[in-house]
Image (cartoon, rainbow, N blue to C red):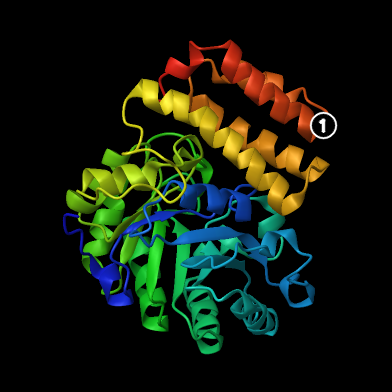
């Protein structure tokens, strides 16, 4: 595979392409789906959903669904919501039982529930306060500590403030950081400002990873090769293209097949991607049932996954409506199989956004 060495190599990460923490998505079944489509020679960091430091200390690993991990799951990075050592310290102690590769601190979530505890994006408002959260986390963590942050508190990006803020995190000892290249009010909409992360990457001594608006394997590769950031973190596009890490590796010269798909190479054409999407949804349903059972919870997870991923698919809204109307998990699985068989034209659909 062609060399893509970045400063993440300092942390023994040779493949600088990551899968983001996503609320309602980054549970064990989704992480396993990504690994099904990843060559065994690729070690990619994959994040959990946001985990509350106020709940974690009292949760039991065998019962808390947000803490389920697959057998021999590696390169896992739990993402922590928190700002007080009395919660952060026992939370990390609990997370270490999962054998994580690292711990990530959320400084980007804009949801009101998160903000009520002065977590998430509100930490962007005070660089000294945020730096102290990093120090506390580093003090209690034997594994690398990262921060994922937004590019701004409001509706605009202030590069000078971001420079000061990320410098404070660096001084506090953060090992690396990811910047979602949109300000808070932009949420997931519109074009991400990759140039901002490019500039910040030049200023920081620690690795800086870009997140936001990465739709294709070429987007991810361009961020690293042309914008010279240290990594590309893929989010929602990975629900439509769970094989995107395989596509990246293939484009860089890796000829290895994926772990769980009997295909000589990743799907590349719009037709191949459209067809493989349904294979992925079927596999996802199987993984949901394995880890969570054929429950109402699994049904909601399945609906949410299809709701997020279907906009990339031609006629995806029609598919989502048919699954959204299901009342039982088994009904949804049957409808997925029937829909794929009865609509050959959608199997030739363009996976685009």
Residue 158 visible somewhere in the drawing: no
For the C terminus, give its image quadrant.
top left
**Horizontal relation, residue 127 to residue 159: left or right:** right
Residue that extends furthest to the front in the rendered view of this protein? 262
Instruction: Please give the name of the residue rendered at 60% of the width and 11% of the height, measured from the top-left corner.
Output: 342
Instruction: Please give the name of the residue rendered at 53% of the width and 65% of the height, measured from the top-left corner.
Output: 73
Q: Where in the figure is residue 160, as x and y percent of width and height?
A: 32, 61
253 or 320: nearer the viewer: 253
22 or 98: nearer the viewer: 98
Classify 45 as above or below 141: above
Q: Quadrant of residue 217?
A: top left
Q: Where in the figure is residue 127, as x and y percent of width and height?
A: 47, 72
Q: Quadrant of residue 61?
A: bottom right
Instruction: Please give the name of the residue rendered at 46% of the width and 24% of the height, measured from the top-left corner.
Output: 275
**Horizontal relation, residue 332 to residue 20: left or right:** right
SS for tag 1? loop
153 or 264: nearer the viewer: 264
Q: Where in the figure is residue 245, as x and y percent of width and height?
A: 37, 48
The crowding category of the residue bearing disc 1, from other C-alpha atoms within 10 Å (few below 14, some 14 to 19, many at least 20), is some
Residue 272 visible somewhere in the drawing: yes
Classify 253 as above or below 263: below
Residue that extends furthest to the bottom in the rendered view of this protein? 139
Instruction: Please give the name of the residue rendered at 40% of the width and 57% of the height, measured from the top-left corner.
Output: 179
For the N terminus, give its image quadrant.
bottom left
Q: Where in the figure is residue 192, as x and y percent of width and height?
A: 37, 42
Residue under label 1, please give it: 328
How many numbered badges does the structure rendering display?
Answer: 1
Q: Quadrant of residue 349?
A: top left
**Horizontal relation, residue 16 to residue 212: left or right:** left
């Amino acid at each position: 595979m062609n060399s893509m060495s970045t400063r993440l190599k300092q942390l023994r990460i040779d493949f600088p392409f990551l899968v983001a923490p996503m609320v309602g998505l980054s549970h064990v079944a989704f992480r396993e789906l990504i690994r099904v489509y990843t060559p065994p020679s690729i070690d990619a960091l994959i994040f959990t959903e946001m985990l509350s430091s106020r709940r974690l200390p009292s949760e039991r690993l065998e019962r808390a669904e947000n803490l389920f991990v697959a057998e021999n799951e590696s390169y896992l990075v739990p993402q922590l919501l928190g700002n007080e050592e009395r919660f952060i310290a026992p939370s990390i102690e609990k997370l270490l039982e999962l054998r994580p590769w690292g711990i990530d601190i959320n400084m980007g979530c804009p949801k009101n529930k998160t903000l009520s505890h002065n977590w998430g994006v509100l930490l962007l408002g005070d660089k000294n306060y945020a730096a102290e959260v990093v120090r506390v986390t580093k003090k209690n963590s034997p594994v690398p500590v990262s921060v994922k942050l937004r590019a701004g508190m409001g509706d605009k990006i202030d590069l000078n403030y971001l420079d000061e803020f990320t410098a404070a995190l660096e001084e506090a000892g953060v090992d690396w950081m990811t910047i979602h290249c949109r300000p808070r009010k932009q949420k997931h909409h519109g074009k991400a400002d990759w140039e901002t992360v490019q500039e910040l990457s030049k200023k920081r001594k620690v690795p800086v990873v870009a997140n936001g608006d990465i739709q294709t394997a070429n987007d991810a590769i361009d961020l690293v090769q042309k914008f010279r950031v240290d990594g590309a973190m893929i989010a929602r596009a990975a629900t439509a293209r769970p094989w995107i890490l395989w596509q990246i590796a293939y484009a860089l010269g890796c000829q290895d097949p994926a772990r769980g798909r009997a295909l000589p190479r990743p799907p590349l054409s719009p037709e191949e991607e459209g067809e493989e999407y349904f294979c992925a949804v079927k596999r996802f349903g199987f993984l949901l049932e394995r880890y969570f059972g054929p429950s109402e919870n699994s049904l909601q997870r399945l609906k949410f996954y299809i709701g997020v991923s279907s906009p990339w698919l031609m006629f995806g809204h029609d598919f989502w409506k048919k699954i959204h109307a299901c009342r039982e998990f088994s009904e949804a699985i049957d409808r997925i199989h029937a829909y794929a068989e009865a609509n050959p034209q959608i199997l030739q659909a363009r996976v685009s956004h």
